[in-house]
Every structure is written in structure tokens, then in C-alpha cells.
């Protein structure tokens, strides 16, 4: 997973959000931060409004003073962005199972890099979430390829294999599909008339192939609880 595109976007906004000086520094434009923070909202606070609010709300004085006079300059912000995205690339190489086993607090570590920078706090992606989405996409693809290989094997041999390794031995699959939440192969078992293939899911626990569901009993592939079942396609368990 690459963050090169996001990094270029951040570089562009750094150019837009700071004044220029001869030494690569520059101060933060409060109006630009307001635009970024509020998006398409019709109400975007103006710099003068921010200052007036600070005057009549003493509780935010420390924050206002910090942003106006002590916020990292352009060069410091770019260096922080470089450190942040270098960390992003490192974390993206680790599976959720590895992050959990190593006791890595991704949010805590990223905040060490960007906590004093308003711009990066507004624009930096939710790293752990972005990384997990990438891993899930890869798992979805590998699971689909495995299901197709199983169906081809059944069509050729007349029955499903006892385990996934047989698919590799018979030339139907190049490598085992790895579950990023266990760092082991996806769970595969034969059933009476078919098979089941699933990931232990976001809770890192094998629930025997029982998927998580929403309030109406509809299966959710990557729910916070339950397994992520790829086959058979789960049927809704409608609540009475």
C-alpha cells in the first residue's frame, strides 16, 4: 500500500496554507485552515472572528496564541509530514495481527508526530483505518481466487479438497490465502455439501464461521465482532 498520492496532496496544501519568507518558513493562514476544516459548510469562521472569539472566551486564549505565534512553520510542517508518511509506509507493511502482537498503538505514535500541528491534524489520514482497508481488499481478492480454485477443483475431481494445500499441489492455487487477522491461512473446512472459507475477523477470534450481523440480522463481512465469511455467502438471519 502506497501513500505517495496523499503525501503529494499534503505538500500542495502546505504551499497553500503558509505565507512565504526567504528562509523556507512562513506563518499559517487561519482562513485556509477554516476552509479545510469546514469543507463545503456555508459557515466558515474568518480569522478576525477567531480573534474576537478568543477575546470574549478566555478559555481558548492559550490555543489561539499557540496557533497564531508558535505553530510550526512551513519547513517544520513539511518535515513532520515526511516523518508521518514514512511511519505510514512502515505500518502499512504490518498486518493487523502483527500490530496487535507487537503492542503497537498506531494512534498514539502518529500523534507524537502531528499533535502540535493543526494542518496535519486536519489533513492526515486515519492511518490504522486506511491500512486495514488495504489489507481487507487484498484478503477479499485472495479469498475470491481461492473460491474459484475450489470450484474448479470440484468440477475436475468430483469433490472438494481436504485442505487448501491440495489446491497448490494440484496446480489450482499458487499460494495459500493469508488471514491478516491471524497471520495464518484463511480457515477452510469441508461441509456436508460444500465448504466454508472465512477470516477470524477484526476481533481476532475464531467464532467457528459465524459472521457478525447488524440489528436486522444481516451479515456484515468485516464487522467488529464475528468472523468474516467468504463462502458460503451468508444468508440474513432476520429477527422476529
Image (cartoon, rainbow, N blue to C red):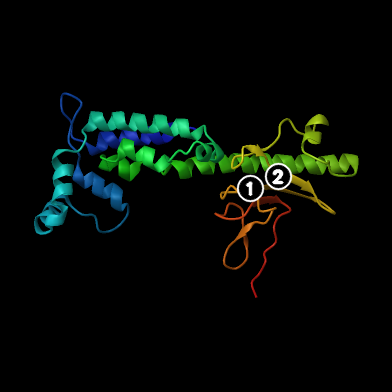
Identity of the residue drawn at 71% across and 34% down = 176
> Residue 42's x, y, as percent?
27, 59
Along the polypeptide, which appears first: circle 1 or circle 2? 2
Identity of the residue drawn at 19% across and 45% down = 30
Question: What residue did someone put label 2 on?
Answer: 187
Kindly check if marks 1 and 2 are in contact, taking CB atoms under 8 A apart as contact.
yes
Task: In the displayed orientation, state which residue is furthest to the left.
Answer: 55
74 relative to 67, above or below: above
Answer with left or right where residue 153 lies relative to residue 213.
right
Q: Quadrant of the C terminus?
A: bottom right
Question: What residue did someone put label 1 on?
Answer: 200
Label 1 SS: loop
Mark 2 residue crowding within 10 angstroms, few (<14) / some (14–19) / many (20+) = many
Identity of the residue drawn at 15% across and 28% down = 21
* Relative depth, front residue between 124 and 198: 198
* Relative depth, front residue between 90 and 182: 182
Identity of the residue drawn at 76% across and 42% down = 148
Residue 52, by quadrant, is bottom left
Q: How many marks?
A: 2
Task: In the displayed orientation, state which residue is furthest to the top.
Answer: 23
Answer with left or right where residue 163 lies relative to residue 112.
right
On residue 100, which mark appears? none
Residue 193, by quadrant, is bottom right
Amino acid at each position: 500500500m502506497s501513500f505517495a498520492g496523499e503525501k503529494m496532496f499534503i505538500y500542495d496544501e502546505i504551499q497553500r496554507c503558509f505565507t512565504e519568507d526567504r528562509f523556507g518558513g512562513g506563518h499559517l493562514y487561519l482562513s485556509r485552515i477554516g476552509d479545510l476544516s469546514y469543507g463545503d459548510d456555508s459557515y466558515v469562521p474568518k480569522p478576525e472572528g477567531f480573534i474576537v472569539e478568543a477575546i470574549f472566551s478566555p478559555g481558548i486564549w492559550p490555543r489561539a496564541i499557540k496557533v497564531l505565534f508558535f505553530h510550526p512553520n512551513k519547513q517544520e510542517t513539511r518535515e513532520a509530514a515526511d516523518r508521518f508518511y514514512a511511519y505510514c509506509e512502515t505500518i502499512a507493511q504490518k498486518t493487523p495481527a502483527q500490530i496487535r502482537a507487537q503492542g503497537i498503538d498506531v494512534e498514539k505514535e502518529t500523534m507524537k508526530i502531528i499533535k502540535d500541528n493543526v494542518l496535519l491534524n486536519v489533513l492526515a489520514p486515519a492511518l490504522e483505518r486506511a491500512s486495514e482497508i488495504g489489507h481487507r481488499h487484498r484478503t477479499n481478492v485472495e479469498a475470491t481466487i481461492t473460491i474459484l480454485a475450489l470450484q474448479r477443483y470440484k468440477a475436475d475431481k468430483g469433490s472438494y479438497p481436504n485442505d487448501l494445500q491440495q489446491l497448490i499441489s494440484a496446480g489450482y492455487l499458487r499460494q495459500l490465502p493469508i488471514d491478516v487477522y491471524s497471520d495464518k491461512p484463511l480457515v477452510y473446512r469441508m461441509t456436508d455439501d460444500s465448504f466454508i472459507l472465512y477470516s477470524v475477523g477484526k476481533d481476532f477470534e475464531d467464532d467457528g464461521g459465524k459472521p457478525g450481523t447488524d440489528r436486522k440480522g444481516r451479515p456484515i463481512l468485516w464487522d467488529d465482532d464475528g468472523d468474516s465469511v467468504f463462502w458460503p455467502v451468508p444468508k440474513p438471519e432476520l429477527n422476529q
